[in-house]
Image (tube, rainbow, N blue to C red):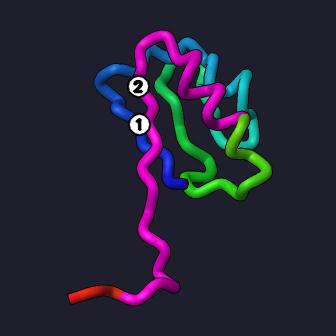
Amino acid sequence: MRIEVDADLCQGHGVCQDEAPTVFTVPKRGTVEIVDPSPGADEHAAVRAAIRYCPTRALSITDEPDSSKGTHR
């Protein structure tokens, strides 16, 4: 899991920080900062909740390919 933010959409509501405070921080007059862009499995549910409840839909998840798997040609 890798988290991405669209800074143009973020309005600093702080919902993400409320849902996953170890992953997101929102300064008093700013936009979200991702503290951990690739959180561990124990944070995945909280991150998904933060993304689901973001009022401006500024957050998203991109899955990184598993590097342990071979590539097919």
Amino acid type, residue under disc 1 in the picture: Val
| Image location of residue 56, percent across then percent down | 42, 14
Q: Quadrant of the C terminus?
A: bottom left
* Residue of label 1: 5
Q: In the displayed structure, does residue 3 sit left or right of residue 7?
A: right
Residue 47 x %, y %: 64, 37
Q: Secondary structure at mark 1?
A: strand
Mark 1–mark 2 distance (CA, rounded to whole Å): 6 Å
Q: Is residue 53 magenta?
A: yes
Query: Which residue is found at the position 32% from the left and 86% from the top?
Result: 71
Callout 2 amino acid: Ala
Disc 2 residue crowd, few under 14, some 14–19, many 20+, Cα 10 Å: some
> Is residue 1 rendered to the left or right of residue 45?
left
Which range is magenta?
46-70
Residue 5 position by quadrant: top left
Pointers 1 and 2 in contact (C-beta within 8 Å) = yes
On screen, residue 8 above or below 1: above
Asked where in the image residue 21 lies, by quadrant, the reply is top right
Where does residue 18 sit, x and y in percent of width and height?
73, 22
Q: Which residue is mark 2?
A: 58
